[in-house]
Image (cartoon, rainbow, N blue to C red):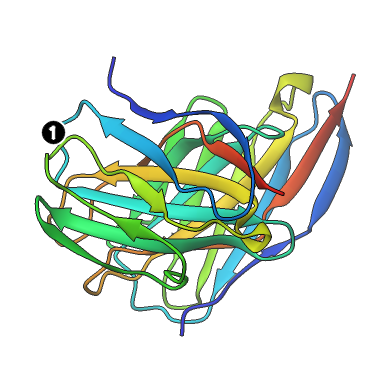
Amino acid sequence: EAQVTQNPRYLITVTGKKLTVTCSQNMNHEYMSWYRQDPGLGLRQIYYSMNVEVTDKGDVPEGYKVSRKEKRNFPLILESPSPNQTSLYFCASSRARYGTYEQYFGPGTRLTVT
Amino acid sequence: KQEVTQIPAALSVPEGENLVLNCSFTDSAIYNLQWFRQDPGKGLTSLLLIQSSQREQTSGRLNASLDKSSGRSTLYIAASQPGDSATYLCAVNSGGSNYKLTFGKGTLLTVNP
């Protein structure tokens, strides 16, 4: 089954404790992206990757890092989480050709930073 | 900067009604538009994708239209069911270097039995 998976689905952590949210897709998609969803603000792009070793900032990259060492994986790293990073996070993927392809989203990771 | 607005923010209808959800966007230079469904606290399920060259797409009881020149899209749901209750999100892909989707804030649909 074609899908985007994220782990963990739920995470409660404390300020400053480094964490990684994994994202994996089995559709051989070149493009992957991270969004966060907050009440009243909607979904905003954090980082994106057009292919292996090619990443760039989205609209709200502060406090996050990413890497793309393999085509299927695009982990989101919070090196020193803060309470304002409490949010619902989504990973997305699609083929990358002129941006015309449907984007597929993972199930989300609900992160709480205390 | 692309902005996406969805009206109404919430809608409550009795089961069986046909309904229309609206989406408008400020910049008509788009690659495509996607409609998503989101259940409470859950992920985004893609419902329909309309390319910029298309006028409409259909899937089962859903029909989405696109009028790029006026910056509007509608999602028509026929014969609504309680299982259709969810938040419906419209997202525009304006292309560029990041394929970013600009989302509306959604319409919360409640279908009452």
Picture layout, residue A42 above or below residue B39: below
- Front residue (pair B4, A83): A83
Image-based side of B57 in relation to A83, left or right: left
Disc 1 secondary structure class: loop
Regarding residue A102, the answer to whether it shows in the image is no
Q: Where residue B5 appears, x then y in whole percent?
A: 64, 69
Q: Where residue B67 appears, x then y in whole percent?
A: 46, 67
Residue at image x 60%, y 54%?
Answer: A37
The residue tagged 1 is A28
Residue at image x 26%, y 44%?
Answer: A74
Q: Residue furthest top?
A: A1
Category of crowding for the residue at label 1, using alpha-carbon neighbours closer than 10 angstroms: few (below 14), some (14–19), many (at least 20): few
- Front residue (pair B62, A30): A30
- Front residue (pair A82, B12): A82
Q: Where residue B44 appears, x then y in whole percent?
A: 52, 38
- Front residue (pair B78, A5): A5
Looking at numbered disc 1 in the image, what kind of residue is underneath it?
Asn
In the rendered structure, the residue with mark 1 lies on which chain? A
Residue at image x 62%, y 54%?
Answer: A15
